[in-house]
Amino acid sequence: MGATFSLRPIGVVKSALTSMDAAPPQGPEAGTEAVIELDPAWSEGLDGLAPGRWLWVLCLFDRAKEPKLKVHPRGDRSRPITGLFNSRSPHRPNPISLTLVRLEALEGNRLRVRGLEMIDGTPVLDIKPWSGNIDQPRGEQA
C-alpha cells in the first residue's frame, strides 16, 4: 500500500471555465464544450478517432482540496451526507477524474469535446474509447 508512482500528463484542457465554482456538477448534463490540446508527441495515437465517437477522458484534479470521508453529494447541503466513494466529489485521495465525452471535432492534436467540465489548464492523463461491448455492465443494455 505504500508504493509511490508518478503520472505524466499527455495534454491540457482548454476551457471557458476558470474556477471550480464555475464548473457544472456533471459535464454531460451541462453539455459543456472544451478542447483537449494533446502534446504533439502523442498526436499519432489519435489515428482512428472521428467526430461522434464517445471517449473516456482521465484528468488530474490539480486544484482539489484535501478529501473528506463524508460529503454532501454535489456539495448540496440539503442532500444527506454519504461516504466519499459514493459521491462524485473532486476532492479525493487520488484526485483523478473519469469523464465520458463526445468527440465533436478533431483538428491535428486538438480534440473538441462535449461534456468535459474541467477548468482551463487541467492536465489530461489519458484518453480511451468508450465501447458498448466493454463498458456496459453484463446483462445491461445501453
Image (cartoon, rainbow, N blue to C red):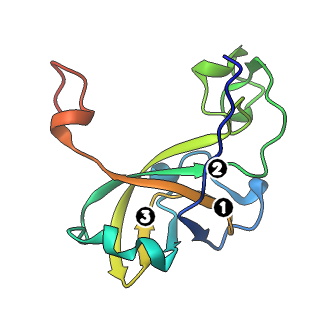
Spatial separation of the CA atoms under disc 2 and disc 3 = 18 Å
Q: Which one is earlier in the sequence, the residue at label 2 or at label 3?
A: 2
Which image quadrant for residue 14? bottom right
Q: Nearer the viewer, residue 6 or 71?
A: 6
Q: Nearer the viewer, residue 116 or 109?
A: 109
Say whether marks 1 and 2 touch (CB < 8 Å): yes
Q: Which one is earlier in the sequence, the residue at label 3 or at label 1?
A: 3
Spatial separation of the CA atoms under disc 3 and disc 1 = 16 Å
**Left or right: where 92 falls relative to 50:** right
Position in image of residue 121 (x %, y %) = 69, 68
The residue indicated by pointer 3 is 114
SS label for mark 3: strand
**Left or right: where 127 falls relative to 82:** left
SS label for mark 1: loop
Report the number of discs: 3
Residue neighbourhood size for the residue with mark 2, other residues' Cα within 10 Å, grouped as few (<14), some (14–19), many (≥20): many
Residue neighbourhood size for the residue with mark 1, other residues' Cα within 10 Å, grouped as few (<14), some (14–19), many (≥20): some
**Left or right: where 54 falls relative to 9:** left
**Residue 60 image label:** 2
SS label for mark 2: strand
